[in-house]
Amino acid sequence: MYNRVVVYVFIYCCIGGNSMELIKLRGRTYYISSATNVGVYRYRNGLCTLIDTGLDNTTGRKITQVLENNNLKVKYIVNTHAHPDHFGANNFIKEKYPGALIVASCKERIFMENSILEGIVFYGASPMHGLSTRILKAHDTAVDINVTEGVIELENKKFEIIPLEGHSIGQIGVTTEDNVIFCGDAFFSEDKMEKYPFPFLFDVGAHLNTLKFLLDTNYECYMISHCDVSLENPKSLIQKNIDNVHQNLEIVLDFLAQPLTREDLTELIIKKYDIPMNISQYFITISSVGAFLTYLLEKQSINMDIIDGKMYFYA
């Protein structure tokens, strides 16, 4: 049963709680516990790199308070991806620390600098009012440094950038010299999967490839964005994420035993999981349904025909 207070599947309504603190992971790698966890790598000179920032100015204000309490100033912000709960506080923090530089992948940069694109992707045209809420649309934020796969140096410290696409078009993971990886939304905790069993995905195939890649890695510590604790051995959890995707693929295939439009299939998914509805939630759900349909079409597991002006999918 979905929690009816939350209306954003897998791109969480991330407003930080009243209390945040800086928690050590390994070496000089820390995180600030929040609705969207914020990675912190602290340098010896009192500067730090943040990995993601959270949803909005309220979150940003709390983050800067934690940093001030620990005598830290922000030099870099590395964003794992361009969903508002991960970069919505960028501008607030950059105003607080004017010299800070923002780092992101080329694909995610486009959305961060033109945040209206998120609504356009969901709707296919100029987005209606219900797609312009802060949950779907952050303020535009300029990206200073583009990154691709490989090692970058920030303040003479090496960070490895790892493609973790699937949940979004160009999501990246960030690994510190302490062998800690910040995974963004590459996989989800068990409690999140229980609350949100139908995941929000941009590309199902890429997401499965990301999960299989992570399954074969051996970092000392894994930090995901929506989890209360860090993970030293997440392999069983990653496998459960894989199983969840395959389970939903089977559900979609079962529904497509009869020809259905994308809207028909979305209705069945909404009813099956009792997903609470508003305009933004509907388009988030139908978008993810589209990702599952694309994957099944590419695998030639389903077919598609246009009949009487409607597009039907069937197994």
Image (tube, helix red, strand yellow):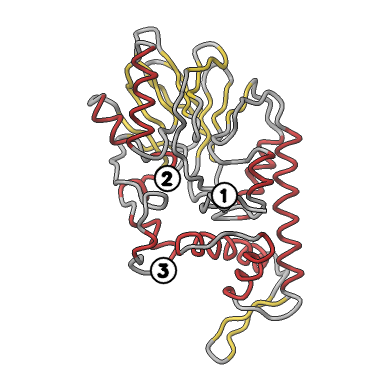
In the image, what residue type sits under mark 3?
A: Gly
Which residue position holds label 2? Answer: 82
- Give x and y (percent) for residue 162: 54, 35
Mark identifier at residue 124: 3
Q: Secondary structure at mark 1?
A: loop
Which residue position holds label 1? Answer: 166
Q: Residue at x 61, y 26 (%)?
A: 229
Mark 1 vs 2, N-terminal side: 2
Marks 2 and 1: in contact by CB < 8 Å?
A: no
Q: Residue furthest top?
A: 44
Say which of 103 and 160 sits in front: 103
Tell me the distance, in whole angstroms, between the alpha carbons under discs 2 and 3.
Answer: 18 Å
Tell me the distance, in whole angstroms, between the alpha carbons under discs 1 and 3.
Answer: 20 Å
The quarter of the picture where residue 204 lies is bottom right
Say which of 303 and 223 sits in front: 223
Q: Secondary structure at mark 3?
A: loop
**Residue 194 is at least partly visible in this image:** yes
- Give x and y (percent) for residue 150: 49, 31
Q: Residue at x 76, y 35 (%)?
A: 236
- Give x and y (percent) for residue 153: 41, 22
Mark 2 vs 3, N-terminal side: 2
Mark identifier at residue 180: none
